[in-house]
Amino acid sequence: MINLLANLLNKLNALKFDKLDNKKIFLIVLACLFIFYLDFTFIMKLQLQGIRTLTPKIIKLKKDIDNLAKDLSWMQDLERKAGKDKMQMAALKPKEIISEDKILLLLQEISDLANKNKAKIMQINTSKDAKVQEEAIAGEKLLPIIITLDLNCGYHSLGTFINALENARQFIDVQDMKIIRDPHNYLLQSVNLIIKTYAKK
């Protein structure tokens, strides 16, 4: 920097300006160099630090997006496979219609499925469908039974539990579902699940 300043002064002297002009030009050049020095030392330094701290965040975000895309693709493949398996199972195994006196056994099986899939049953109720007293299915009169479950579980556990219900040997149909986030644990959901089955009289 000193050599650069000396060269500038020599060139200015060669131009034969008077001493007052040389001093003004010297001060202007000195001020420009000082501003350039401040800009490089502080502003550029802050910008470089910002880039250094931002780069790992960008890399992490890109990895998260890639992982999310992979997980989404895996879930879609799983859903397609589950749909095919479900169709094959339905074709191979006809669903069992329970008799009215076996409703308590069905509730126990549903409870066992919930425990296996880490879905905690807080409350379980059964009621006959108020809208329809009896339904004729395949020439047989069947009584619709509504089962209401209050669950506490995560999304994954809920999904596996519903899948287990649909693959159960008895006929079970998911009618309605309401999900509310558990205020005490953000990883868990409070779920109201309404399922329907039929019973022989």
Image: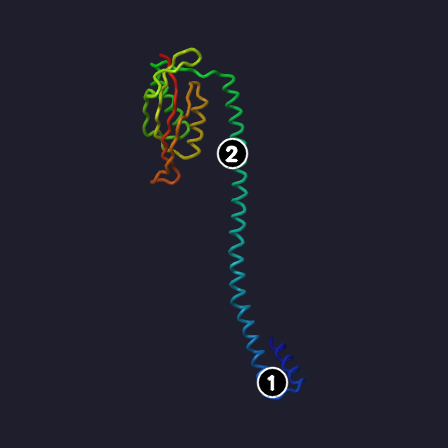
**Picture layout, residue 52 above or below residue 161:** below
The kind of secondary structure element at disc 2 is helix
Residue at point 41% right, 11% down?
140
How packed mark 2 is, by other alpha carbons closer than 10 Å (few <14, some 14-19, many 20 or more), is few
The number of numbered discs placed on residues in the rendered structure image is: 2
Callouts 2 and 1 close, C-beta under 8 Å: no
Image coordinates of residue 171 in percent, x first then y, are 42, 19
Mark 2 / mark 1, whichever is N-terminal: 1
Residue at point 54% right, 38% down?
70
**What amino acid is at disc 1?**
Asn
Identity of the residue furthest to the right in this view: 14
Scheme of colours in the image: rainbow
**Picture layout, residue 82 above or below residue 26:** above
The kind of secondary structure element at disc 1 is helix
> In the picture provided, is 160 more to the left or to the right than 45?
left
Image coordinates of residue 117 in percent, x first then y, are 42, 29
- Distance from the alpha carbon under mark 2 to that under mark 1: 76 Å
The residue wearing badge 1 is 22
Image coordinates of residue 49 in percent, x first then y, are 52, 60
Q: Quadrant of residue 134?
A: top left
How packed mark 1 is, by other alpha carbons closer than 10 Å (few <14, some 14-19, many 20 or more), is some
The residue wearing badge 2 is 75
Q: Quadrant of the C terminus?
A: top left
**Picture layout, residue 38 above or below residue 25:** above
Residue at point 55% right, 71% down?
37
Residue at point 66% right, 87% down?
16
**What amino acid is at disc 2?**
Met
Identity of the residue furthest to the top in this view: 139
